[in-house]
Image (tube, rainbow, N blue to C red):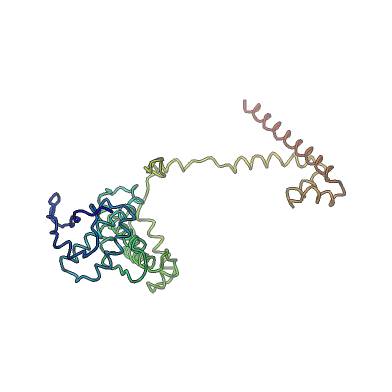
Amino acid sequence: MTISRAPRTPSARSPGRRDPLPSETLRRRALGDLPAPEDPLRASTDDARILSVSLFRRLHELDEGTPEHSYVRNTLVELNLSLVKFAARRFRGRAEPMEDIVQVGTIGLIKSIDRFDPGRGVEFSAFALPTIVGEMKRFFRDTGWAVRVPRRLQELRIELAKASDALEQRDGHRPGRAALAERLHLAEETVAEGELAANAYAAHSLDSPVGDDETGAPQGTAGRRTAVEEPAYELIDDLNSLGPLLAELDERDRLILSLRFGEELTQAEIGRRVGLSQMHVSRLLARILGELRTGLLDDGATEDATDG
């Protein structure tokens, strides 16, 4: 890890204006003996994870509101911005600008840094991602609904999302309907109603992009999915054509087919059932299946000739 200048401190001032670099004295007071990456925004994932562990311990040693505390906090923000970009990629197909999504996700990152307790033994990325994604989802919720639903259901959807984020962060997995109902003191039927209302939030055009290409960019259209080839239709046609052919077989041939493909017996088991050798059963099956195959092909050729 290259040790050089201290990171720039994020600022709420006008865009394009940078804060002056913190003094070497402030850096030493803030970090103590900890190293500062040359550029936190370009630190590798492994470097960011390792250094964040030490920085979180240092952050809890400093008094909140002091310049040293702000310096360490801002360094943690820059080191872990890759988590925000990682979470934002799952929403790259949305209409909202990616820059806005990342900005909103950064708010979730800052909240996670303020709430994180290194003493719990949980990795920061696992703790932060649900909060980051939750902020992004709240941003999308605030942009409007595709289908108008009652205000009660809109508010219920928001409460369900908040409870889901909180439970996922606490338990490490997405909560089920019963867990959400218990947390919000609601009936499971009410939770189900809120989940159903969530489907009205966004409507997708039949021409909207779906799927990813090799580069990860969306491609294709949802409209193509309205007409697809159904392989079961061909199977139904084959079964309809096979019926008359089976009716022409004698009783023993139909029994052998039933035992082989209905009860899934082996040729030896079939032989014992009907009193024939395994070799004899094998020859009978080959003959029967050959006759059925020929019958199906002849039937198909007849249909083609009729259509022509």
Nearest the viewer among 2 and 264 is: 2
Q: From the viewer's perspective, tell me whether residue 264 is left or right of residue 104.
A: right
User: Is residue 252 left or right of 84 when viewed as pictured?
Assistant: right
Q: Is residue 40 above or below residue 171?
A: above
Quadrant that contains the C terminus? top right
Q: Position of residue 202 (x, y in %)?
A: 35, 53
Q: Quadrant of residue 80?
A: bottom left
| Residue situated furthest right in the rendering | 275
Residue 288 lies in quadrant: top right
Residue 272 located left or right of residue 237: right
Q: Position of residue 131 (x, y in %)?
A: 32, 62
Q: Position of residue 26 (x, y in %)?
A: 15, 63
Residue 33 vs 282, above or below: the answer is below
- Image mark count: 0
> Which quadrant of the rendered structure holds the N terminus?
bottom left
Seen from the viewer's position, the closer of residues 164 and 11 is 11
Percent across and percent down for residue 262 are 73, 50
Residue at screen point 82% across, 44% down = 281
Taking the spot 32% from the left edge, 69% from the top edge, the residue there is: 118
Which residue is drawn at the image coordinates 32% and 65% (left, top)? 155
Q: Nearer the viewer, residue 291 or 61?
A: 61
Q: Nearer the viewer, residue 120 or 233?
A: 120
